[in-house]
Structure formats: structure tokens, C-alpha cells
Image (cartoon, rainbow, N blue to C red):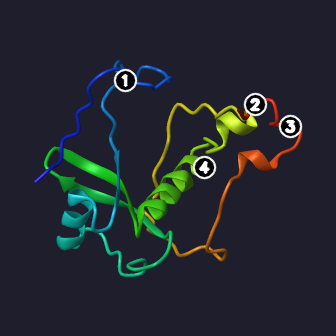
Amino acid sequence: MSEQYTTTGTSNFAGPNYTDVSPANVVVIAGTVGHSTIIDNLIASNAIDVSAIKGQWESFVSQLVQNPMPGTPQALVIAGSDPRGTIYGIYDVSEQIGVSPWYFWADVPPKKNKNIYVLPDKKVQGPPSVKYRGFFLNDEQPALTNWVA
């Protein structure tokens, strides 16, 4: 069983158009354990093992999976223990390929790469040492005073 996602209306995406790029050898599948049919099917088929993160706070597993679903020869699977764990897993991969999750805020341009490689090693990231993390725009005086309405 596979999920299909469609969008309607206009998109707010303001990045490059990737329609002319040849098909990738590896796709990225990201989802949350217990909330994604695709991730749950990969767990049930023993394609991924999430026992190290199950029930953990903001944790994730990322690994390369062969034939995760029909028509997909390889996928980098990011499985989060909760929604924020999934997001931090995506941030982790973004950082590895040279894209800062703070691109807009720090005006850090992403590195340009013609090729991106996925290592076959599984990565398990457990819960953070600080349980509650936050980013507070209204804490920065005077730098963001005129920007925040």
C-alpha cells in the first residue's frame, strides 16, 4: 500500500523548479512512527528497526532502505518517534547536505552540490539533553524589534 499526496490551489514554495531533473536513485521518505502508513509498513516488514526510539522524546532513525515500496529501488528513510523527532531528522539530513535550517534567519546561503550521497550506515538520535527547546523572536532587542509586528 502506498500513499499519494496531492496539493490544490497555489503553492507558497519559492525554490528552484526540479521538473527537468532526471529521476533520483534515492528518494527520501520521512514520517512519524504510528502516524505514517508508509513508515508503519516499513516497520512491520522489518525494513527499519525503530525499537531504539520508540516512546522517546524528539528522537529519530535515519537509514538507507532497499526496495521500500514498488517502483522505489532505494530510499533514505527518516522515522521520528514523534512529529518533532521527524522534523529534527529532516534537519539532520539538511545539515549534512549543507542546507542550514536557519537559512532565512541567519542569511546563510546553502552550499551548492551537484551530487549528494547517502551512506548505508543507520543513524539513531535519541532524545535531547534539554527537554524543551524554543526559538523566541520577541527576545531579540533591538535587532528584530522593527521586524516583529
User: Distance from label 2 to label 3 (Cα)?
Assistant: 8 Å
Residue 51, compared with residue 28, is above or below; it is below
Which amino acid is tagged 1?
Val
Q: Are marks 1 and 4 in contact (CB under 8 Å)?
A: no
Report the Cα–Cα distance between label 1 and label 3: 40 Å
Ranked by sequence position, the earlier of labels 1 and 2 is 1
Left or right placement of residue 144 versus residue 31 in this view: right
Q: Quadrant of the C terminus?
A: top right
| Residue type pointed to by label 3 | Ala
Reading the chain from its start, which is encountered first: label 1 or label 3?
1
Residue density around tag 3, few if under 14, some if 14–19, many if 20 or more, within 10 Å? few
What residue would you read off at disc 3?
143
Tag 3 secondary structure:
loop
Residue located at (55% from left, 47% from top): 94
Residue denoted by label 2 = 147
Mark 1 or mark 3, whichever is nearer to me: 3
Question: Label 4 near label 2: C-beta < 8 Å?
Answer: no
Q: Residue furthest front?
A: 149
